[in-house]
Image (cartoon, rainbow, N blue to C red):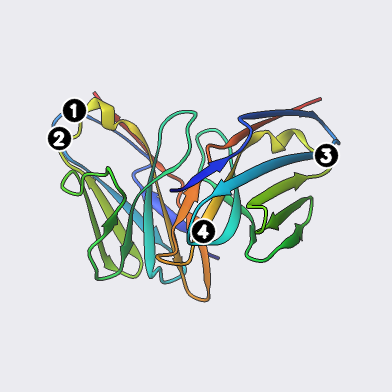
Amino acid sequence: GAVVSQHPSWVICKSGTSVKIECRSLDFQATTMFWYRQFPKQSLMLMATSNEGSKATYEQGVEKDKFLINHASLTLSTLTVTSAHPEDSSFYICSASGGSTDTQYFGPGTRLTVL
Amino acid sequence: GQSLEQPSEVTAVEGAIVQINCTYQTSGFYGLSWYQQHDGGAPTFLSYNALDGLEETGRFSSFLSRSDSYGYLLLQELQMKDSASYFCAVFYNQGGKLIFGQGTELSVKP
């Protein structure tokens, strides 16, 4: 149990375009979902926390107008990188928690490359 | 503020025991988690300590001392497949968020 999926697993886009990444909890209801970014050989940096039906809470330094997060249901959260630039190229990972445990279960990640 | 410190690299041989330390300075601490991440993959949950003491899960054990703001992950009977990055992460009760350390790259040699 506790499977989290992400789609797409990788994406290449041109500078200036927007990219949407989906995060789904497949076998549990995720009351909270988290979005992280990870650059090569670095740690996971928390970008934002989203609770179903509420606005996301962004970490300091993360532009909420650039990284749009929607958590419309208990099994789906989306991250949209708007007007992507090469410096946004990174590994984006979501996690989800819910049910009787606070353990976060991570998705497989989405590798974004902006040309 | 929040900060977690881990060694950046550790090398050990197959069959050995290795300990990865984590010290933290943070407010709002609720517990300490450990995750494993292979290259290009997602973090995998290993262990969680909310209380002081040792938690054992198979070959992996984790320890926490809240008074010392210190924890460690102990890996026994090392195998080649254990070569990966290991992250400690502080769990905050408020918001349930995790803040990760910089990670320790473990290399297991034959």
- Determine the residue positioned at 52% across, 76% down: A100
SS at mark 3? loop
The vertical placement of B89 against B106, above or below, is below
Q: Identify the residue at image location x=59%, y=55%.
A: B33
Mark 2 in CB contact with mark 3 (< 8 angstroms): no
Q: Amino acid at mark 4?
A: Phe
Q: Circles 1 and 4: CB distance less than 8 Å?
A: no
**Could you say which disc has been placed on residue A14 in the image?**
1
Q: Nearer the viewer, residue A25 or B63?
A: B63
Viewed as shown, does residue A16 lie left or right of B33?
Answer: left
Between disc 3 and disc 4, the foreground one is 4
Give the numbered dot on residue B17.
3
Of pointers 3 and 4, the one earlier in the residue sequence? 3
Q: Chain of mark 1?
A: A
Query: How far across and down, in percent of the image, does residue A87 sit?
Result: 27, 27
Q: Let me know if marks 3 and 1 both belong to one chain.
A: no
Residue A100, above or below A37: below
Q: Are marks 2 and 1 in contact (CB under 8 Å)?
A: yes
Give the chain letter at badge 2: A
Q: Chain of mark 4?
A: B
Number of numbered discs: 4
Are the residues at dot 3 and dot 1 in contact (C-beta closer than 8 Å)?
Answer: no
Q: Secondary structure at mark 4?
A: strand
Mark 2–mark 1 Cα distance, whole angstroms, equals 6 Å
Q: Read off the residue under disc 4.
A: B91
User: For the residue marked with disc 2, what is the amino acid?
Assistant: Thr
